[in-house]
Amino acid sequence: MPSLIPEEQLDKILSRQRELEQLLSAGPAGDDYVRLSREYAELAPVAAGARDWHKLHRSLRELEDMLEAESEPEMRNLAEAELEALRERLPELEQRLRLLLLPKDADDDKSAILEVRAGTGGEEAALFAGDLLRMYQRYAELRGWRFEIMSLSETDLGGVKEVIALVKGKGAFARLKYESGVHRVQRVPETEAGGRIHTSAATVAVLPEVQEIDIEIEEKDLRVETYRAQGAGGQHVNTTDSAVRMTYLPLGIVVTCQDEKSQHKNRAKALTVLRARVYEAERHAREQERAQQRRSQVGTGDRSERVRTYNFPQGRVTDHRIGLTLYKLDRVLNGEAVDEVLDPLIAEDQARRLAEA
């Protein structure tokens, strides 16, 4: 049976893994150790699949040779049955291996910076942004990720104007990146006396959390200002200039952080968010150069793209990128059924990339 996987490609992967083992055993220092360890960890599942592939093909060849040499009917029957079982396993193994061999987003294993902002719809949009915040908090909890709010701006009625959170966990970005875009809600606001359905929106942006090893920001490119933190309605919430506004001058990117009472902590949080935004801007520029590839993926991750509608009267959630509708609104909003939306999105993305390959 002809294989869909080039054997020389698998041999190169196994050879590179052995090379990495030797380099790591030599005890490289600092950034080299981090870089080599990361490559080794990324290569490990592909190498394991390559070894399984080689083992299965060796077994197939041995059984085929046995059948050519064997004349005993009972032994031939046993060999044929085993051969058939291995042949049935082969397509599944090759499909899994092809997925592992797809070019991987280098940021997939990273934690995520999640930003939710109220869009059109006034107070109702801010209340919906709060619903999304709680959905992501609950989803992170169910997956065992740590959810840390880094910056939060609320309305007087308890809605959310803007929130920035760090979702700490391996692979958080790989799943949450599909949430980027415009989320719409259709429901009757509590303040609506006539019972009319209103449509409001919130925007979601998901960025990979990046470390200094990923991107270096020099002090000369920063303007840092401090001011007194304010609460809802504009009142001052403390008496020291603890809030921080940080501007990355080359790109004009601005981040503010005032949630901590310590200026030092606010500065550290602002730098974390700024680093992620600068990295994302550079990442976006690189992806624009690969526009054809980007168009073939599930959505673009653009904040202006409508990705999902939450319809309360019908109890449904519709993801417009793949035409998926679930009548599980409550379970999606409490985080329990978020994977039922994300899994088909990921599968669709993988299928398109496989078709391209």
Image (spheres, helix red, strand yellow):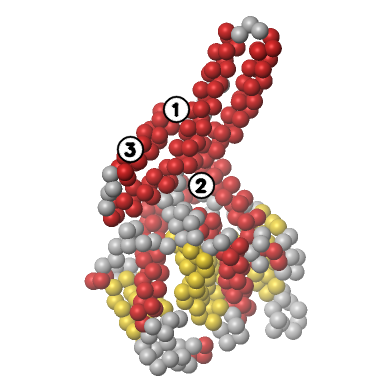
Question: To which quarter of the image does residue 127 belong?
Answer: bottom right
Q: Give amino acid for label 3.
A: Glu
Label 1 sits on residue: 7
Residue density around tag 2, few if under 14, some if 14–19, many if 20 or more, within 10 Å: few
Q: Is residue 78 visible?
A: yes
The residue located at (29%, 76%) in the rendering is 223
Callout 1: helix, strand or loop? helix
Q: CA distance from mark 1 to mark 2?
A: 28 Å
Question: To which quarter of the image does residue 20 belong?
Answer: top left
Q: Is residue 356 visible?
A: no
In this view, the residue in front, 130 or 81, is 81
In this view, the residue in front, 330 or 317, is 330
In this view, the residue in front, 67 or 242, is 67
Sequence order check: which comes first, mark 3 or mark 2? 3
The residue located at (76%, 82%) in the rendering is 194
| The disc label shown at residue 19, or none | 3
| The disc label shown at residue 185, or none | none
Q: Position of residue 251 (x, y in %)?
A: 33, 67
Q: Position of residue 226 (x, y in %)?
A: 34, 84
Q: What is the quadrant of the N terminus in the image?
A: top right
Q: Position of residue 286 (x, y in %)?
A: 37, 53
Q: CA distance from mark 3 to mark 2?
A: 35 Å
Asked if labels 1 and 3 touch by Cβ distance under 8 angstroms, the answer is no
In this view, the residue in front, 201 or 317, is 317
Label 2 sits on residue: 296
